[in-house]
Image (tube, rainbow, N blue to C red):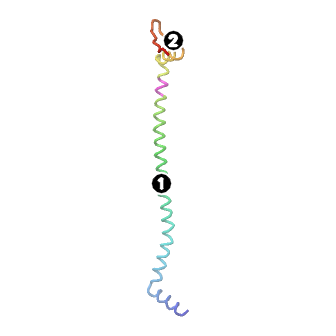
Amino acid sequence: MSSRRAAFKKLKKGGRLEILVVLILLVLVMIPLTLNLMKLKREKQELQQETELLDEKLAYEQQRSEELKDFETYTKTKKFAEDMAKDKLGYVYEGEIIFQKDE
């Protein structure tokens, strides 16, 4: 037991014990911080991917919205009414010639 005390006193006198304790504490603090940093980087990457996906979805929906606005404008035109009358009801203008395929 006296040899342990002597070794402890020798370490303590030289300041090595304090350095060793500080190093151990640093390691104990750095491990959780490093793990947390890695977790945050992974989460950041996942959020960036999700953001890119949502940006693509937003661009698609904006394009679709434009197409719907264009269609809405088209439905209010005389051309639309004529096209629907021809396609759905089979109406034609007087004197208009309709060509049909022989089946």
Whole-percent x, y for residue 23 in the image: 46, 76
Seen at 48% across and 72% down, the residue is 27
Seen at 47% across and 9% down, the residue is 93
Q: Nearer the viewer, residue 88 or 15?
A: 88
Looking at numbered disc 1 in the image, what kind of residue is underneath it? Lys
Q: Which residue is mark 1?
A: 44
Query: What is the chief secondary structure element of the magenta stretch?
Result: helix
Work out which residue is located at the far bottom of the displayed protein and give it: 2
Q: Which residue is mark 2?
A: 91
What segment carries the magenta color?
69-73
Q: Is residue 33 above or below residue 102?
A: below
Q: Nearer the viewer, residue 19 or 53?
A: 53
Work out which residue is located at the far right of the displayed protein and give it: 1
Pick the quarter of the image with the N terminus.
bottom right
Whole-percent x, y for residue 99 in the image: 45, 12
Q: Secondary structure at mark 1?
A: helix
Work out which residue is located at the far front of the displayed protein and give it: 103
Mark 2–mark 1 Cα distance, whole angstroms, equals 61 Å
**Is residue 87 found inside the magenta-colored segment of the image?**
no
Circle 1 crowding by C-alpha within 10 Å: few under 14, some 14–19, many from 20 = few
Looking at numbered disc 2 in the image, what kind of residue is underneath it? Tyr
Whole-percent x, y for residue 70 in the image: 46, 26
